């Protein structure tokens, strides 16, 4: 195993999720001045760049690594951040990976919602409580819409972007819990200890997002 580099204040440890966020996150961070490139396809999970260590994680683990200070900074979807309940600093909405978390049912379904399938039990519980719906929540891991199609659940709470998955499966969006997009997340202690590196990075990302939004 390669030893971890000494974590001097000028070294950054970065947590990124593999999956749909990784490539766009790397491109944006490189535009913001970090010396990063797409890692070669391999089983390696930790990648070294000049002054930056990149950790490749599952989405749900990014807030954990940042909150516990193993990573100084990371990028993750707002959906995953809300679900994590972690109190990390969230200085920039990076605007990509835009989608929404919605309540979904079969088209025309009107019966009582007794059971809800979701990958987001915490957000689902908060929403259902606020709506006064005393439904059972079933935690699922993927292809969540199948739960509504098969009768495993009376409704699901899942992400919608284009609506293509809904249309292909005779489902409809009944309500929107919240909008999501990729967020920069920063460990609060690192923000002080590594401020010489983190403050310019945050500023540069804010500028890039603002320019991209206008342009
Ligand atoms: N269809 C979509 N369009 C745009 N953004 C999406 C879409 N689906 C998910 N996202 C956003 O991208 C993030 C990462 O999605 P991705 O598909 O890589 O995760 P996953 O593979 O489902 O996660 P897991 O690590 O649990 O397997 C989500 O947390 C969400 O913020
Ligand atoms: O509105 P759309 O553009 O169709 O996008 C929504 C779909 O994208 C995500 O699934 P993903 O492809 O990540 O697969 P997963 O269910 O295995 O997470 C999400 O869970 C929806 O199923």
Image: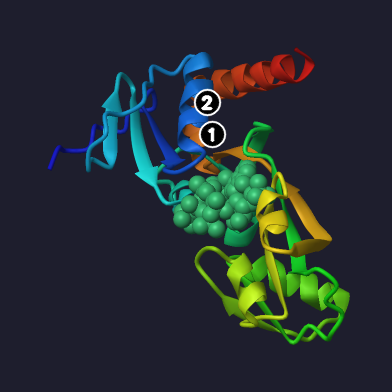
For disc 2, the marked residue is: 198
Residue 177 visible in the snapshot:
yes
Helix or strand or loop: what does disc 1 sit on? helix
127 relative to 29 in the view: left or right: right
Helix or strand or loop: what does disc 2 sit on? helix
The image shows a total of numbered marks equal to: 2
Look at the numbered discs 2 and 1 and tell me whether their residues touch, using CB distance below 8 Å. yes
Q: Earlier in the sequence, mark 2 or mark 1?
A: 1
Mark 2 and mark 1: Cα distance apart in space: 6 Å
113 up-or-down from 16: above or below:
below
94 relative to 194 in the view: left or right: right
Name the spot of residue 28 as percent of width and height, x first: 54, 22
Residue 63 visible in the snapshot:
no
Determine crowd level at label 2: few under 14, some 14-19, many 20+ residues with C-alpha closer than 10 A: some
Q: Quadrant of the N terminus?
A: top left
Who's the residue at 76% across and 65% down the image? 103
Who's the residue at 87% across and 80% down the image? 110
Name the spot of residue 154 as percent of width and height, x first: 72, 80
For disc 1, the marked residue is: 191
22 and 33: which is toward the camera? 22
Residue at the far left: name it.
1
Who's the residue at 82% across and 82% down the image? 133
Who's the residue at 22% across and 38% down the image? 42
201 up-or-down from 189: above or below:
above
């Amino acid at each position: 195993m390669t030893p971890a580099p000494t974590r001097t204040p000028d070294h950054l440890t970065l947590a990124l999720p593999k999956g749909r966020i990784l490539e766009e996150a790397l491109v944006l961070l490189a535009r913001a001045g970090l010396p990063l490139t797409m890692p070669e396809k391999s089983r390696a999970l930790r990648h070294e760049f000049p002054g930056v260590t990149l950790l490749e994680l599952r989405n749900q683990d990014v807030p954990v690594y940042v909150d516990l200070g193993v990573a100084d900074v990371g990028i993750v979807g707002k959906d995953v951040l809300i679900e994590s309940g972690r109190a990390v600093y969230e200085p920039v909405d990076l605007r990509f990976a835009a989608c929404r978390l919605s309540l979904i049912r079969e088209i025309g379904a009107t019966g009582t919602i007794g059971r809800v399938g979701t990958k987001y039990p915490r957000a689902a519980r908060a929403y259902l409580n606020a709506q006064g719906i005393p439904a059972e929540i079933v935690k699922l891991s993927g292809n969540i819409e199948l739960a509504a199609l098969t009768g495993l659940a009376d409704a699901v709470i899942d992400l919608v972007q284009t609506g293509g998955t809904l249309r292909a499966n005779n489902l409809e969006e009944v309500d929107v819990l919240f909008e999501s997009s990729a967020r920069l997340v920063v460990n609060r202690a690192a923000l002080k200890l590594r401020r010489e590196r983190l403050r310019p990075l945050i500023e540069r990302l804010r500028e890039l997002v603002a320019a991209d939004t206008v342009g």
